[in-house]
Amino acid sequence: MIRALSLVLALVPVFCAGPARSWIAEQGRVRIVYEVPKAPEAHTIYREMRARHLLEGLRETLGIIRLPRSLTLRLAECGGEVNAWYAPTTRSVTVCYEFIQDVQSRAPKDVSPTGVTRHQAIMGSIAHVFLHEIGHALFHLLDVPVLGREEDAADQFAALLLLRLGPAQARKIIDGSAFLFASYAGEEKMEKGDFANDHGLFRQRFYNLLCLAYGSDKRTFGYLADRGDLPEERTANCAAEYDQVAFAMDRLFGRHLRSDRMARERTRRGFRWTF
């Protein structure tokens, strides 16, 4: 447990010098940075994400893990590039304001035909992409072995962490993230370069995410099969797929967690910013 005095001192924000005045704060081994963007549209996102305590929530979630070295979580303007990445040299996860702006442009104005709200589509997608990149960071920082493509493993890490939230919250975030995958999938041209990419096709990532959700809890996610989002031939193996991923993640990350009880509680607290 973090001592009360240490926690109070750690929560004091540190402001960087210079005209940009990015908002920077450190707690434990996790540093968060909200870079102040120049574009007016990005500045609106900057204010909203700060008001929601987006990075603080992710930092809270990472508190369940004993990090051997520091890690920076950063929101930044990326010169018009819609992107997110983990940089091993600087040990930093960056999500671009442009990515969030793109997510907002794809989200339904109110509610999608499948019942996904605009809020779910936006915040669920942001949660998933941050956790995906944090997965890359933890594979590196904790020296976790990865069998297969690391991009697939990062997707599985993100999904598993989300599925260990409460059922109602997990469903909202999973549905929002799946909405983004489906949106991107509709634009894939299936050219040679798409198949050569180290990322899976978005349609594959969409089905993989839904299968893990369905396999984790058929009662909560049974609607995915009922309305045909998951083909029947895939649902038959989803429970086994989820068990395989859960076993691997527990075995690989278990020794780095502070405690199972604390892990669950801090994960749920950390995602209060989503819904």
Image (tube, rainbow, N blue to C red):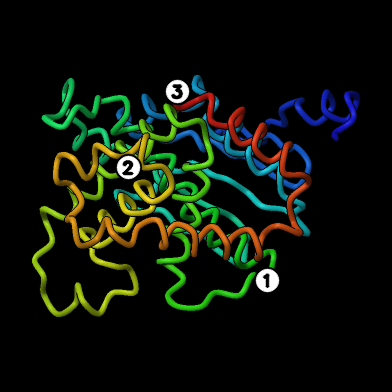
Kindly identify which residue carries mark 1. Answer: 143
Kindly identify which residue carries mark 3. Answer: 47
Whole-percent x, y for residue 72 in the image: 63, 49
- The amino acid at mark 1 is Asp
Kindly identify which residue carries mark 2. Answer: 177
Residue 62 image-quadrant placement: top right
Q: Is residue 241 above or below residue 196?
A: above
Residue 105 image-quadrant placement: top left
The kind of secondary structure element at disc 2 is helix
Can residue 131 be seen by looking at this rendering?
yes
Distance from the alpha carbon under mark 1 to that under mark 3: 35 Å
Nearer to us: label 1 or label 3: 1
Q: Residue at x 49, y 50 (%)?
A: 160
Q: Residue at x 54, y 44 (%)?
A: 74
Whole-percent x, y for residue 31 in the image: 67, 43
Name which of mark 1 and mark 2 comes first in the sequence.
1
Q: Would residue 155 be found to the left or right of residue 115 on screen?
A: right
Distance from the alpha carbon under mark 3 to that under mark 2: 22 Å
Name which of mark 3 and mark 2 comes first in the sequence.
3
- Work out which quarter of the rendered image holds the C terminus and state it: top left
Q: Residues within 10 Å of mark 3 (few under 14, many from 20)?
A: few
- The amino acid at mark 3 is Arg
